[in-house]
Image (tube, coloured by chain):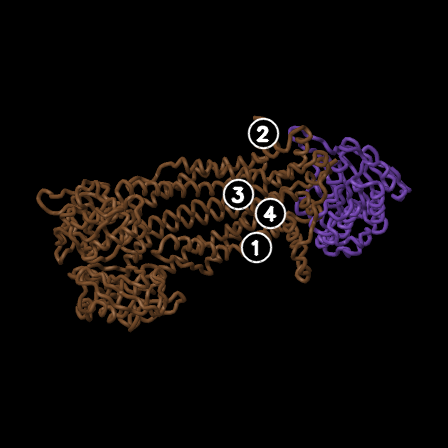
Amino acid sequence: MNALTRKLARTIRSTKGQFLAVVAVVTLGIAVYISMGTAYLNLHQSQEAFYRENNFADYYFHVVRAPQQVVRQIEALPGVANATGRIQTDVPLLKADNQRATARLVSCPMPMETEVNRLHLLTGRLFDRYPQGGGVEVLIDPQYAAANSLGPGDTLNVVVGGQRVPLTVVGTATSPEFIYPIKDSATLMPEPETFGIIMLPHHQAQQLLNLSGQINQVVLQLAPGADGEQVAAAVKEILEPYGNLSSYPRDQQLSHAVMQAELDGLRASAIILPIVFLGIAAGIQFILLGRIVKAQRLQIGIMKALGYNNRQIMLHYTGYALAVAVVGAVLGSLLGLLVASGLSQLYAQFINLPETLSGVNLTAIAYGFLLSLGVGTLAGLIASRGVVGINPAESMRPEPPKSGRKALLERWSWLWARLNLTWRLGLRTISRNRTRFALTLVGVVFAVGMLVVAFSTNDSVGYMLQRHFYQDQDYDYLVHFTTPVHEREIASITRLDGVLRAEPLLQVPVRIQFAGRSEDEVLVGLPPDATMRTLVTKTGRTLPVPEAGMILNERTAAKLEVQVGDRVTVETLLEMGPSRYEDFTVIGINQQLVGSGAFVSLEQANRALQERNLVSGVMLQVDPGLAPAVEASLNDMTGVAAIMSRQKELDNITKVLDLMIYSVSIMIGFAVVLGFAIVYNTAVVSFSERRRELASLRVVGFTSGEVSGLLLKETVLQSAVGVVLGLPFGYLLARGIIAAQAQSTDLYTLPVVISLQTYLFAALGGILFILVAHRFAARGVARLDLVEVLKNRD
Amino acid sequence: MTEKIASDRILMKLDRVTKNYVMGEVTVEALRETVLEIRDGELLVILGPSGSGKSTLLNIMGGMDLPSSGRAYYRGEDLSRAGDRQLTRFRRNEVGFVFQFFNLIPDLTARENVELAANLVDSPLPVEQVLKEVGLADRMDHFPSQLSGGEQQRVAIARAIVKNPRLLLCDEPTGNLDYQTGKLILSLLAAVNRERGRTVVIVTHNTAIGAMAGRIVRMRSGRIVEITENPNPVSPERIEW
């Protein structure tokens, strides 16, 4: 080890508190980068590989029913690489305790190898086409299997055509389209207890559903370079006679869309957060090294007198920043890998990707090191540029007093005159060190902003749940019937003991057309005096259910570019009977956080079907004490397809929220470390460069407490502005994050809700890290050796 | 009773004061069994080459440092056993310090530097009047960096005397000043002693300065080697070096 390296090691030792504080910030930056970067790369790569190996479809087409042979015709189209015809439909599933769940039956043509959306077997064995002893063998998705403790040999009961049909489970499987298994876009998150995917041989499904020789869905892969929309138009033409229900590209496939949003979010975080942390670490090092260079002016003068050149000396001080970079990168990588494995386990609970997501990603680590070293070198070189200006002869003479200057505030003399001398001193010191002030400000603003974002998660989720489950839809149960029934038939439900209130609804899948654009939607017919489904505008005004005209949700309205007053055409997409067309005037646009819908009166919805008094479901409010009994009675009714329970949905969400607390705590921890590191470093630097000044105050008769109080005032002045600005910055940050998410998914709208309490907690958090940092930094005041500091330099 | 009378006349008494510094692995004896009495109202000059222990002696007198052994009494109060709080109170109320390197607060103007000290005591002297006395009537609102060395030292003196302390301790007050300015500063210190009746102790290696003192203490290698009474002090303007 040469002398300069030893000197560097000693400098680090003598500033170890500050060194560790910067290392902590770099560590966090790198840890975030490695963990999120690794998770992103792993997820992305396994997703791509899985899509490729299992022939994930590029386009989906739903029809009422079509002969199997159309698939050949479609496959022959130019631009189509591969097409599969199959059956997909949702049927009620009766669970062991007689509760209802929804099963999505998906048929699989055999042999599967070349088919689109091929299955991937996870456990058990593939189903037999003709099992010995008859019956139907099925594979189920792993989430449903786990949530309902199902394994090979167990039996599932589905209801098809009013008949209970037993299915034998032989294993679990997944496929590219069910990586994230949620029922529909109105569902907030996977509900594995009440929604499962059931895969079975194609011919068995045909038999079961009475669709011999038929299919109701075509999935296809495009040939490389083919124009998706052109191909889709051609396919739709072929399918036209068979009742086109809907078609969409991969982008709009639910599982893929959610995964993509998650991946985009991960990638954005993996880039933005490390930039913030490393940027602030660079700022701290800039302050710290600038101070070290100043304090070691004499030593630098001597080195120059001995013959070291500027470059050598600058590299010596840059070594400090490099040491920070290396230690931070090593610790950050370790922490990052730890967090990455936790993150992977977290994802594994929600997604069905067969190839495990763990795995050390050397690329991410290599980039992490490069990033850390790059930023460190830059910060080091910029901070140590002061070396150049040092003249060896001058450096041996005592430094002239730092030039005092007037603070900006002195222009307001009435205010200035009212300020106590010690406050004035703090303000002037800050104005003398504007760069330092600015860097500290930025650091504190980010730290407090992060606290606001972290604490506000609770507000947003609370608001969302309150609004979705108690305001927008204020029912305990939503019962869906297998087919629409006459209104009076719901009397059997309304009469149930414990039902306090019931409101019917009619849901019809439709396609809304406007000015050449079209979107698939659900037409929801509600009674005009409905109380359990409330429609509100963006500004919070309640819209009554219209007797004439339609209220359209904001997202669909935006896609169709529909304004209030426009007239749209609604085409029904029922699996029975011909399509019907009806025009509606859009009289209002409502905002809802989750899901979509086009809302009309019950009567208008019936008119669209050319029917009268039909309903497809009923919303119920029940006596809490009698809820289990009501639910049991509903489960026993034939004709009930699904029962949505508010309590069950909330319970399911609460489980997920526990995981959210984990990530919020991590974010709070990061913010506090960041804030502490910057405030502590600024305070220590300010203290160490003014040891003489402060010692002379002690000599004049200031107590240690008074001197420490003086430093506190300065620290508070430095950071209080940061706390104040951090609060609105947090709001903007939260809005930015949500806007970024909104851009990548149109499945749900997250509100920016920040309560007064959140601002208060964030501000308190800020004050806390400032005070703790000050306490650590001011420890030196009591130990200030007056004689040593003031010793004459003779 | 006798002690009471004695303490009226004797402001400070150092009784066999020893100070050892541990510098790494060697112990340096900066002061050895030093005995000295400071009389109320006198102007005392302590002379000695560098390393003779004169600054150490001054630091102990000013409550900046504690003796390793021996006692230091200020008006009968034992400072050698005092805690940090008591020493701070002593420095605040009884002592004014003037250093070779001024040690002003760079971010405060001349007036504010003096005010800072004045704020510490119950009945300080009027700040502006003190600044006028040291000849800084037109420079009050300048920052230290805008003042010459002599002016900075005058601010330091104003800062020391504004608290109206009984004891003014000056460590090489002219060490960093040119000849003319140095003499002006010494005149100022003599005036504080003469007109305000304050006790002034000046530590210097410049033997010529001794001529202005009522008593001269000479030190060498941590010991007082000679104490001389000087019945006819010379005005600093007439001292040559």
- Dot 3 corresponds to which residue? A281
Q: Is residue B241 visible?
A: yes
- SS at mark 1 in the image: helix
Mark 3 is on which residue type? Ala
* Shade of chain B as shown in the rendered figure: purple
Residue B160 vertical position relative to residue A617 in the rendered view, above or below: above
Quadrant of image for the C terminus of chain A: top right
Mark 1 is surrounded, within 10 Å at the Cα level, by few (under 14), some (14 to 19) or many (20 or more) other residues, namely: some
Q: Is residue A6 left or right of residue A306?
A: left
Q: Earlier in the sequence, mark 2 or mark 4?
A: 2
Q: Are marks 2 and 1 on the same chain?
A: yes
Residue A257 rendering spot, x and y as whole percentages? 33, 51
Residue B180 rendering spot, x and y as whole percentages? 85, 43
Q: Nearer the viewer, mark 2 or mark 4?
A: 4
- SS at mark 2 in the image: helix
Q: Nearer the viewer, residue B218 or A440?
A: A440
In the rendering, which numbered label is found on residue A436? 4
Residue A185 rendering spot, x and y as whole percentages? 30, 56
Q: Are marks 3 and 2 on the same chain?
A: yes
Cα distance, mark 1 to mark 3?
20 Å
Cα distance, mark 4 to mark 3?
13 Å
- SS at mark 3 in the image: helix
Cα distance, mark 3 to mark 2?
24 Å
Quadrant of image for the N terminus of chain A: top right
Mark 4 is surrounded, within 10 Å at the Cα level, by few (under 14), some (14 to 19) or many (20 or more) other residues, namely: many
Q: Nearer the viewer, residue A237 or A112?
A: A237
- Dot 1 corresponds to which residue? A721
Q: Earlier in the sequence, mark 4 or mark 3?
A: 3
Mark 1 is on which residue type? Val
Q: Are marks 1 and 3 on the same chain?
A: yes
Mark 2 is on which residue type? Arg
Q: Is residue A157 left or right of residue B217?
A: left
